[in-house]
């Protein structure tokens, strides 16, 4: 009676597996130096799933639980037929990864296949080691923090591609970071 229903998220059990045993037609190989949440984000993008939150839901996980997975075993389980095991944590800080990301717009623009570098996710990494430019942590268009719930590696949910003019990092930033390390 005038109502509507929202489509239910398929589960790993309800999805048809391909002849190779995988749920996914596109199975990108993680790149050297690619971050853990970045590789599944690229898998989601390549298979048009709609981001990490939806990919996690397929496996009955929340985004936070998904980011806690052990990359070596979880990747094989996600693209293959293994069992995904979420590590139990006794402390809130144990194994905690931030849902937020930083990106080097110049690296993403130069990549044939854009991917998130693990070094960008380090708490004190503010400068790209390749381009010596400041890493972007907010979308220049909507000012939203860049996080892993986005649908594409190099695009904000607002639709803006992460790009901006080259900004060389001021020397004092590197000096401050060295003081903390």
Image: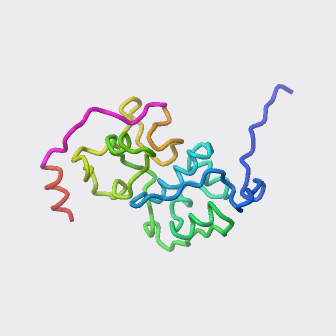
Q: Main secondary structure of the magenta part?
A: loop
Specify whether residue 160 is painted magenta: yes
Residue 74 occupies which quadrant of the picture? bottom right
Left or right placement of residue 93 versus residue 78 in this view: left
> In the image, what residue occupies the spot 72% across and 57% down?
12
Q: Quadrant of the N terminus?
A: top right
Q: Quadrant of the C terminus?
A: bottom left
Percent across and percent down for residue 117 are 38, 54
* Vertical arrangement, residue 137 with respect to residue 94, above or below: above
> In the image, what residue occupies the spot 81% across and 29% down?
3
Specify whether residue 51 is painted magenta: no
Left or right placement of residue 16 versus residue 132 in this view: right
Q: Which residues are magenta?
A: 159-171
* Vertical arrangement, residue 164 with respect to residue 37, above or below: above
> Outermost residue, right direction?
1
Left or right placement of residue 86 versus residue 32 in this view: right
* Vertical arrangement, residue 66 with respect to residue 105, above or below: below
* Vertical arrangement, residue 145 with respect to residue 14, above or below: above
């Amino acid at each position: 009676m005038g109502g509507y229903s929202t489509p239910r998220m398929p589960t790993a059990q309800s999805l048809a597996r391909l002849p190779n045993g995988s749920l996914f037609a596109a199975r990108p190989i993680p790149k050297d130096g690619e971050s853990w949440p970045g590789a599944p984000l690229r898998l989601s993008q390549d298979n048009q799933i709609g981001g990490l939150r939806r990919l996690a839901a397929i496996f009955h996980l929340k985004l936070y639980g998904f980011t806690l997975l052990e990359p070596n075993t979880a990747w094989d389980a996600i693209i293959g037929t293994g069992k995904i095991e979420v590590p139990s944590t006794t402390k809130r800080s144990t194994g905690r990864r931030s849902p937020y990301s930083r990106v080097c717009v110049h690296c993403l623009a130069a990549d044939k296949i854009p991917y998130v570098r693990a070094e960008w996710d380090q708490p004190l990494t503010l400068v790209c080691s390749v381009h010596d430019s400041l890493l972007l942590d907010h979308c220049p268009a909507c000012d939203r923090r860049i996080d892993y719930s986005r649908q594409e590696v190099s695009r904000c949910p607002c639709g803006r591609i992460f790009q901006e003019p080259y900004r060389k990092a001021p020397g004092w930033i590197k000096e401050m970071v060295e003081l903390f390390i």
